[in-house]
Image (tube, grey):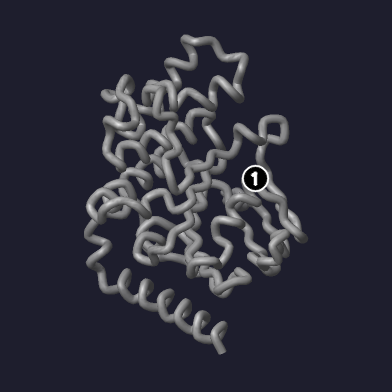
Amino acid sequence: MALEPIKTILDIKGVSKTFESGTHALERVTLKVSEGSFVALVGPSGSGKSTLLRIVAGLLSGTSGSIGHDLNDDVIANDIGFVFQDPTLMPWATIAENVAIPLRLRLKGLGNAEIDKRTQEVLAWVGIDAFKNAFPRELSGGMRMRASIARALTTQPSLLLLDEPFAALDEFTRAQLNEDLLNLWEDQRWTGIFVTHSIREAVFLAERVVVMSPRPGRVIADIEIPFVYPRTPDLRNDHAYSDICADISNRLASAITDAEL
């Protein structure tokens, strides 16, 4: 029996971005992302990683190039979930109310019973359903970020974009959320694009690590990560894992040196 061809869900072709200030953020970025895959973007500060993510989400427009997708055109806003660096929760609303916001704004045909059901479901996915009536100020940073991920998943998106969501967390919490995020991805198989400054985080999470140059951001390497899923904490102590991290680090260091010459 022949295997089904791998479906491309996102096709980025020659995308460049120059802001009105004159900042040249991206230069001819080309990248294909397969359905159900998990891709990490790494690069130095200012390499355009977050800018690229926002262009994919439709929050910014590129100066040139194109973004092709195989998402549902009728509900494109619902087919993309976005997790920002900051949880951006409304302080006066409970966690459940915060998580339900996309359902109330985007899927206005849903009744309250269905909204409550979906909200409870996604809170359980991220492990904070017991805190649905708490306010953001009552939760730790890690739990607030779990709520932010839950909110992004309420519309059941095909593509989840994550912009350095764990950067401000302590090492232990970050490692735990890495593992929990992978468990969610393996269970639900949305397509994930994860921006991070941490090479070790990128290699632990992703099937592919895309390395970007200093500004203007270009793709300088696209590295397949060979480790099978599920990935356990022991992987972080594996020599092969460390070797891949070192290779990516060396590529970045070389690109930064070249940019300074």
Image quadrant where one finds the C terminus: bottom right
Rendered location of residue 27, percent (x, y):
68, 69
Crowd class of label 1 (few under 14; some 14 to 19; many from 20; radius 10 Å): few
**Which residue lies at the image location 49% right of the left edge and 66% below the top edge?**
45
Toward the right, the furthest residue is 64
Q: Identify the secondary structure beneath mark 1.
A: loop
Q: Nearer the viewer, residue 200 or 53?
A: 53
Amino acid at dot 1 = Leu
Q: Nearer the viewer, residue 167 or 193?
A: 167
Q: Is residue 227 above or below residue 141?
A: below
Q: Is residue 216 visible?
A: yes
Rendered location of residue 172, percent (x, y):
22, 52
Q: Is residue 2 visible?
A: no
- Within the image, what quadrant is residue 241 found in? bottom left
**Which residue lies at the image location 48% right of the left edge and 51% below the top edge?**
163
- Within the image, what quadrant is residue 253 found in? bottom left
Q: What residue did someone put label 1 on?
A: 59
**Which residue lies at the image location 38% right of the left edge and 63% below the top edge?**
198
Q: Is residue 77 above or below residue 115?
A: below
Rendered location of residue 231, percent (x, y):
31, 54
- Within the image, what quadrant is residue 246 found in? bottom left
**In screen coordinates, is 133 left or right of 221?**
left
Q: Nearer the viewer, residue 144 or 201?
A: 144
Toward the front, the furthest residue is 21
**Which residue lies at the image location 60% right of the left edge and 69% below the top edge?**
217
